[in-house]
Image (cartoon, rainbow, N blue to C red):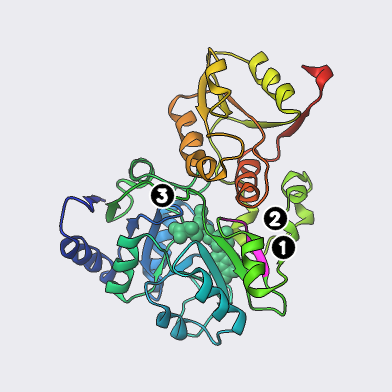
Amino acid sequence: MKTEIIDIDEVSEEKSFSVCRDVILRGGLVAFPTETVYGLGADALNEEAAAKIYSAKGRPSDNPLIVHIGKREQVTKLVTKIPSVAEKLMDAFWPGPLTIIFEKSEIVPKTTTGGLNTIAIRMPSYPYTNRLLSYLGIPIAAPSANLSGRPSTTRATHVIEDLNGRVDLILEGEDSEIGLESTIIDVTGDIPVLLRPGAITISMLEKVIGKVSVDPAITKEAILSHDAADFHPKAPGMKYRHYAPKAPLTVYYGEEKAVLLKLLSLEDDRIGILTTKEHAPLFKKGVVRSLGSHDDFQETAHRLFDALRSFDEESVTAIYSEDFSGPELGEAIMNRLLKASGGMYKEVKGENI
Ligand code: TXA
Ligand code: MG
C-alpha cells in the first residue's frame, strides 16, 4: 500500500482535513498526532475499517480500541448511559489525556471494543486533532500508532518507521507533549477503577470524584510477578509485554549512588544506558540516553519511548536503566518502564557494586 504523508504545517488545514475525511469515509487508516502519543485511526462504527487497524498493527483481536471524539455531544450515541461521575470527569479533564470506559450502545461494533460490551472514549487536546475530530464528526477508533509490542510512537518519524506502507495516510505533527498514553478509568461499576496510569493521576481524579480504586493487575507487584496468571487486567491491553525495545532491559533500584556505580561498572560499547541528565556525562562508552533529572517527571515521560526506540536503531545487545520511581506521573513512567523490562527490576546493594 502506498502511504500518503502530509506535514500538517505545510498544507492548509482545509486540505489535510479533507484528505483525511476521504480516507476515513472509504474505510481507510490514518495516523495522527495527539498530546499523549500518536494514534492510528479508522471509523469506529465501520467494522471492516476497525478490523484493518488490528491487521496493520499486528494487534491481538481481543485488545479493544479507544474511540476518539472532538465534541462531547458525540458521547451520547456511543453509550447506554452517562453516570454522574463521568460527567464530572469530562468537565474536569476533557479535552485531555483521560479515557473513560462506559457501557457501549448498539451502534458500536464489537470489533472496535475487542468483543466487550463496554467502550473506551477520549477527547484529545492536541489542538489540530481536536479540530480535525470535530470536523469529521465521526468517532475514530485509534490505538497507539506503533506495531504491536513496540514502544508507542511520540514522533512522526516513529510512525513512519512502523507504519509506512501499512496505512493510507500519516499526518505529521509535533512531538507528543506528554509522551505516555492516556490514563484509563472505568466508571461502569459502583466505585471508579483506574485501569492504566497516565498524566491524569489518581490524586487529580480523587479531587474531582472521591475514592478511586486501582485494578490490582496494574500495580508494581503484579507487573513484577512472574506468575502473571494470577493477574487479569481489566484493560486487556495491559496484559501484553509492551513498550519493549528489542534488547533485554534491566532496571536497577537502590541507593542512587550505588545504582550509578553499578551502571558505570557495566560500561561496554554495545550496551544502552537509560540515565539522568546529571549522570549521563559520566558514561564514556555505550549508547547513553538521558531522561532528564530524577524529579522532572514531565521531561522523563516526554522522552521515554523515544529513548527506548533509539536503542533499537543502535542495535544494542542489552539495556540498563536507573530507577525513575516517584509519585504522581512517576507511577505512570514506572508502569511503562517495568512493562518494557518484562519484570527485570533488580536491587543494587552496596556490597554487590
Ligand atoms: O493516549 C492514548 O490513549 C492513545 C492515543 C492514541 O489516544 N491510545 C492508546 O491506545 O494508548 P492503545 O490501544 O495503545 O491502548 C488502549 C488501551 C488498551 O490497554 C485496551 O485494552 C484499553 O485501552 N481498552 C480499550 N477499550 C477498553 C474497554 N472497553 N475496557 C477496558 N479497557 C479498554
Ligand atoms: Mg498501545
Q: Which residues are magenta?
A: 193-198
Q: Is residue 30 left or right of residue 299?
A: left
Is residue 230 visible to the viewer in this orientation of the structure? yes
Q: Is residue 33 left or right of residue 113?
A: left
Q: CA separation, marks 1 and 3? A: 26 Å
Which percent across, then down, holds residue 73?
Answer: 41, 83
Q: Is residue 240 left or right of residue 180?
A: right
Which percent across, then down, holds residue 54?
Answer: 45, 59
Q: Could you say which quadrant of the image residue 164 lies in?
A: top left
The crowding category of the residue bearing disc 1, from other C-alpha atoms within 10 Å (few below 14, some 14 to 19, many at least 20), is some
Is residue 62 visible to the viewer in this orientation of the structure? no
Q: CA separation, marks 2 and 3? A: 24 Å
Residue at the spot of label 3: 176
Residue at the spot of label 2: 218
Q: Residue furthest right?
A: 351
Queried on whether the Cβ of the residue with tag 3 lies below 8 angstroms from ligand 1, the answer reads: no
Of badges 2 and 3, the one in the foreground is 3
Quarter of the image with the C terminus is top right
Residue positioned 29% across, 67% down in the render = 132
Asked which secondary structure carries label 1, the reply is strand
Which percent across, then down, holds residue 323?
Answer: 67, 35
Picture layout, residue 221 above or below residue 67: above
Q: Earlier in the sequence, mark 1 or mark 3?
A: 3
Picture layout, residue 305 above or below residue 91: above
Which amino acid is tagged 2?
Answer: Ile
